[in-house]
């Protein structure tokens, strides 16, 4: 397995359009295009005698559907996708699950919290009413009126990026074991990036499908959202990283949702934990200077100015900065006051 991982990581090759690259016996790597900087999601096709089990789907866009059409045309001997597994609720992972089910897949698997939270978010996005609670959330973060209007203009697009979800599903749960592609996979649940993120670990084969829970070159976004503004997902994410380090050995081949397959899971987890502690320290030092709003802290956390014209990045940065602040509130080192407009000003206790 180590030799295989080194070969994949060292090669300047990743799956091209309509290509399935075998990374382990009966485990195929394909990529579905995304708009934006990431430009792709990795999907994993686990081949059995009668078809494929697919892990993650891509977003509901014409480009992604065209990519799937080309991929399915390349499947050997007329084989098809018979089972769809989704690691979590974000549109690049669940977006085409319903479409693939309508295209002939027979089973749809997801954790309970991810499925129902996704349905709630789609329902909210389809609501014609202005989400006043969302506006209050953004005012609290220090957003300008122009930034809020930009968000409201884009808000209905969330539901469009997810094809209609199947009305029923099979539940993924912590500790379940399933046979897919000739490998036995144990379900390991993480949290923080999303509420009940499913990873798949094959102990015998030394494979770990990590979804977005651990990525090789970027940190998973951990955000507070208007649905739960006082949540502490950062604490969940850090606990999940420590759990993964305890339950999954270092020598697995990690199959992530973005970028390349990699080895060295424990070193990567240690790096993520260390980087997050450094971010907390920078926040504490910045707040020594005096109270600040969420939007005043982007450069402190991310090392660069983020303009609200870059809507998606601005929104994600807001959620992650607030996740850091809520974590520090929970440990008792930070508090906030509220000004006349409703903005929260954070400072050390």
Image (cartoon, helix red, strand yellow):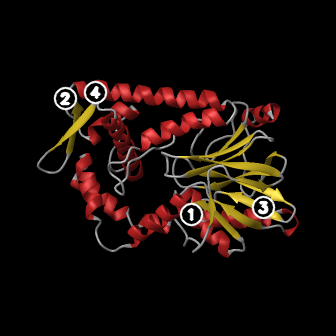
Q: Which residue is mark 3?
A: 52
Horizontal arrangement in the rendering, residue 76 relative to residue 235 (left or right): right
Q: Residue 256: x, y in percent?
A: 64, 44
Residue farthest left in this picture: 340
Horizontal arrangement in the rendering, residue 241 relative to residue 295 (left or right): right
Mark 4, secondary structure of its residue: helix
Mark closer to the chain start, 3 or 4: 3
Residue nearer the viewer, 302 or 293? 293
Q: Quadrant of the C terminus?
A: top left
Q: Are marks 2 and 3 in contact (CB under 8 Å)?
A: no
Q: Please report contact status of discs 4 and 2: CB closer than 8 Å, yes or no.
A: no
Q: Earlier in the sequence, mark 2 or mark 1?
A: 1
Q: Earlier in the sequence, mark 2 or mark 3?
A: 3
Q: Which numbered disc flags the more N-terminal residue, 1 or 3?
A: 3
- The residue where tag 2 is placed is 290
* Pointer 1 residue: 95
Instruction: Name the residue at the front extreme.
Output: 175
Tell me which corner region of the image, top left, top right, bottom left or bottom right, holds residue 6: top right
Assign a secondary structure to mark 2: loop
The label shown at residue 284 is none
Return the x and y of residue 183 as percentages of the image width and height: 80, 49
Q: Quadrant of residue 153?
A: bottom left
Q: Which quadrant of the view contains residue 210?
A: top right
For the residue labelled by badge 3, is the local secondary structure a helix, a strand or a loop? Answer: strand
């Amino acid at each position: 397995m180590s030799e295989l991982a080194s070969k994949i990581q060292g090669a300047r090759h990743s799956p091209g359009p309509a290509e399935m690259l075998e990374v382990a016996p009966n485990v195929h790597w394909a990529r579905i295009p995304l708009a934006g900087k990431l430009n792709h999601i990795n999907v994993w096709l686990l081949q059995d005698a009668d078809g494929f089990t697919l892990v993650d789907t891509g977003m509901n866009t014409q480009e992604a559907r065209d990519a799937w059409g080309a991929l399915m045309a390349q499947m050997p001997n007329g084989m098809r996708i018979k089972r769809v597994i989704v690691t979590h609720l974000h549109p690049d992972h669940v977006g085409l699950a319903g479409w693939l089910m309508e295209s002939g897949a027979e089973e749809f698997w997801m954790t309970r919290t991810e499925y129902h939270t996704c349905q709630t978010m789609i329902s909210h996005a389809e609501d014609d009413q202005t989400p006043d609670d969302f506006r209050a959330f953004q005012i609290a973060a220090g957003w300008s009126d122009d930034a809020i209007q930009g968000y409201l203009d884009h808000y209905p697009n969330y539901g469009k990026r997810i094809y209609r979800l199947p009305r029923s599903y099979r539940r993924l749960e912590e500790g379940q074991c399933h046979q897919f592609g000739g490998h036995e996979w144990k379900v390991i649940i993480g949290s923080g990036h999303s509420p009940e993120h499913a990873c798949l670990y094959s102990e015998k084969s030394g494979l770990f499908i990590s979804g977005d829970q651990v990525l090789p070159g970027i940190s998973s976004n951990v955000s507070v959202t208007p649905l739960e503004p006082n949540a502490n997902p950062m604490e969940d994410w850090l606990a999940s990283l420590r759990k993964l380090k305890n339950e999954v050995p270092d020598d697995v081949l990690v199959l992530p949702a973005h970028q390349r397959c990699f080895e060295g899971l424990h070193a990567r987890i240690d790096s993520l934990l260390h980087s997050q502690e450094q971010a907390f320290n920078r926040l504490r030092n910045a707040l020594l200077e005096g109270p600040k709003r969420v939007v005043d802290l982007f450069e402190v956390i991310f090392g660069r100015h983020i303009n609200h014209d870059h809507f998606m990045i601005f929104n994600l940065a807001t959620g992650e900065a607030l996740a850091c602040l809520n974590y520090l509130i929970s440990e008792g080192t930070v508090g906030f006051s509220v000004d006349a407009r409703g903005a929260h000003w954070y400072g050390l206790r």
